[in-house]
Amino acid sequence: KDAEGIASQIGAAHGITAAAYKANVSDQKDIEAAIQRIARDFGKVDILVANSGIATAISAEDYKPEEWQEIMKVNLDGAFYSAQAAARLFKTQGFGNIIFTASVSANLVNIPQKQAAVSMTFTSRTEGAA
């Protein structure tokens, strides 16, 4: 199903306004524009859940540079750009919350892959950004 259709179904089922937005998380300007569009449409943003990610089953020694760069653009840059755009809005609004999600692969070696988003969450928490 398409995202707009699912948003319509959710809205109708619960008597609320629901909308779908599309943005490339690896593009800072695209994310910033999407967050601003959502704030305009709804009057505010209460929460951002940074939940994008690419998982692969490629051994570390077999990654091509472009594959690794794509993963980092989505998994790390995407989480940062999303949180950054939301934080700017939350600072203006005076409120808002950011939740980072990450795979359990950061702690369990089911498919050996480092999860930079987890480390970023812990770091930003100590710096007061999350």
Image: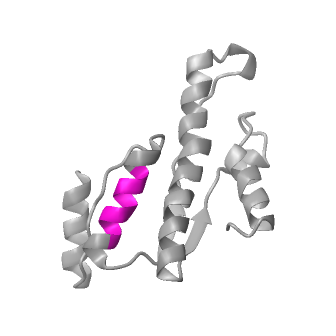
Kindly identify the residue that appears in the image at 55 percent across and 67 percent down.
Answer: 87
Give the overall secondary structure of the magenta segment: helix
Q: Quadrant of residue 97?
A: bottom right
Q: Quadrant of the C terminus?
A: bottom right
Q: Nearer the viewer, residue 93 or 122?
A: 93
**Residue bounds of the magenta highlight:** 31-39
Q: Nearer the viewer, residue 33 or 121?
A: 33
Kindly identify the residue that appears in the image at 23 percent across and 75 percent down.
Answer: 11
- Does 33 appear in magenta? yes
Task: Report x, y in % for residue 103.
Answer: 65, 50
- Does 94 appear in magenta? no
In the rendered structure, the answer to whether residue 38 lies left or right of residue 92 reads left
Q: Is residue 54 visible?
A: no
Query: 25 above or below 85?
Result: above
In the rendered structure, the answer to whether residue 72 lies left or right of residue 113 reads left
Query: 53 above or below 40?
Result: above
